[in-house]
Image (tube, rainbow, N blue to C red):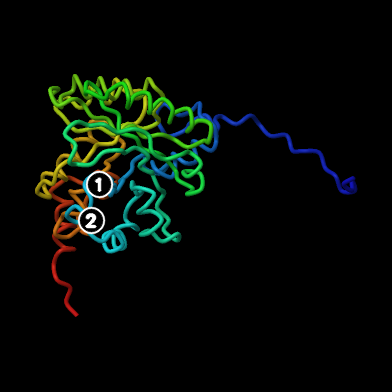
Amino acid sequence: MADLEGFKEARDIKAASGSCASSFHIKGSSHLDWGMKNRLSRIIKPDTGRTVMLAVDHGYFQGPTSGLEVMKDTLAPLANYADCLMLTRGILRTSVSPGVQAPIVLRVSGGQSVLTELSNETLNVAIEDCIRLNVSGMALSMYVGATYEHQTMVAFAKLIDAGYSAGIPVLAVTAVGRDMARDARYLALSSRIAAEMGANIVKTYYCENFEKVVQTCPVPIVMAGGKKLPEIEALTMAFNAVTRGAVGVDMGRNIFQSDCPVGMIKAVRAVVHYNEKPETALKIYEDQKKPHKS
């Protein structure tokens, strides 16, 4: 039994006006358990409420696509500037140092290649492996209005159950059928369905009336980078997305296919975390691109 000598009564503390537990910084997540909140806070930073995710998972269906031929070479200079890395378990185990501090959102869907015309993915990583790899989130593609809509939604539901059981958040990578425009109507539809099914974060494309997509989704939205654009256009798209409510971006090709990837990710960070205008952020990219004098 503990020694009671010197025991003092607790001080009379006035009731606190608020609690950090009741004012969680991530939309739609205040009800979650501590582990889920902690993992989400690694992805979406508490100081800004924003995130710059680096998507380098393209090889799971495209193979050694341009910019990702040798993953160690691609990731080494970029990892320290990313708030989060989105990749596959094969690349995580072979090409990422365990000392990297960036949290991992693991791609857990697949089952097709770029050679297949129709999107036909399903869940292909067990929750036990996600736990072994200490990931902060899991990402699965969900196709709305496509041939395999039902298959991907059922897989997504199973992943949500597994994620809540293990305390690992789930990111929905939303896509719409080929016959559906990437406009606010369909992107809001797919984003809302993902959130209704239990997604903790939704990744979707930027579009006109993007604020409608954000406002009708009860969890955070990150903007998908999409195809490679000129740097000023990619920065403008990122600026418009966060201005209209996105919590950040999940960019891949617009960073690793840039002629100065480090400069570009620094510029994207300036836009996302510090609200820099695209033209100002572009100067960060251009300065990094300049040859350094010895």
In the rendering, at what x and y percent does residue 179 appear? 12, 22
Q: Compared to 61, does 102 lie above or below?
A: below
Q: Name the image quarter holding residue 237.
A: top left
Q: Is residue 207 left or right of residue 51?
A: left
SS category of the residue bearing label 2: loop
Q: Quadrant of the C terminus?
A: bottom left
Up the image or down, 180 lies above or below 222; here it is above
* Amino acid under disc 2: Leu
SS type, badge 1? loop
Please tell me whether residue 133 is drawn above or below residue 125 in the rendered image. Answer: below
Along the viewing direction, whichever of 239 and 144 lies nearer the viewer: 144
Task: Examine the image and state in which quarter residue 198 appears.
Answer: top left
Count of numbered circles on the image: 2
- Residue 51 pos. (x, y %): 33, 43
Q: Amino acid at mark 1?
A: His
Left or right of 76 in this view: 163: right
Report the quarter where the N terminus lies: top right
Disc number for residue 58: 1
Residue at the spot 30% in from the left edge and 38% down from the top edge: 111
Residue 4: image location, x then y, percent: 89, 45
The circle drawn on residue 68 is 2
Evaluate if marks 1 and 2 touch, with contact meaning CB atoms under 8 Å apart.
yes
Q: Which mark is residue 5?
A: none
